[in-house]
Image (cartoon, helix red, strand yellow):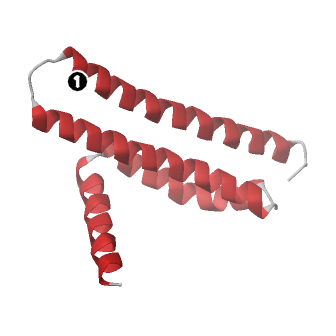
Amino acid sequence: MERWIRAAKCSWRGLAAAWRTEAAFREEVVVLVLAFPAALLLSADPWRRAALIGATLLVMIVELVNTAIEKLCDRVTTEQDTQIGRVKDMGSAAVGLSILFAAALWSMALALALMGRR
């Protein structure tokens, strides 16, 4: 149980640090807060609601991993390095793909809701 408490404290510190230092993360938190009522309005199906919220959370998860990679790379060197640049670009691509995935799910849910198939 003590290990879980320590892990929860580390997680909380990581979330707090991301909130303080990363504008993208703060924006994604706002999107998540808006996503909860939007999911309730767009679908009556609990699994579809969970998928919509899950896709939004996935974007935040990938953003946190990307931020960690970027911070680690910056700790290794602040000089221009093509390999580190490529690593950072791949992390950014992962965030971009997670956003496309979430946007696709939300678009499908919206289309179904507009067709009356909540």
- Quadrant of the image occupied by residue 63: top left
Residue at position x 53%, y 36% in the image: 99
Q: Quadrant of residue 82?
A: top left
**Rendered location of residue 72, percent (x, y):** 19, 40
Q: Say left or right for 4 vs 56.
A: left
Asked if 34 appears above or below 95 in the picture, the reply is: below
User: Is residue 91 positioned above or below 4 on the image?
Assistant: above
- Please identify the residue farthest to the top as the structure is shown: 82
Residue at 19%, 34% in the rendered image: 73
Q: Is residue 15 left or right of residue 61?
A: left
Disc 1 on helix, strand or loop? helix
Kindly identify which residue carries mark 1: 84
Q: Residues within 10 Å of mark 1 (few under 14, many from 20)?
A: some
In the displayed structure, does residue 40 sit left or right of residue 20? right
Q: Quadrant of residue 66?
A: top left
Give amino acid for label 1: Ile
Q: Quadrant of the N terminus?
A: bottom left
**Looking at the image, which residue sits at the far bottom?**
1
Residue 102 in picture, x, y percent from top left:
60, 41
Query: Does residue 68 sit above or below 1 in this rendering?
Result: above
Q: Residue, x 15% and y 34% (percent of image)?
A: 74
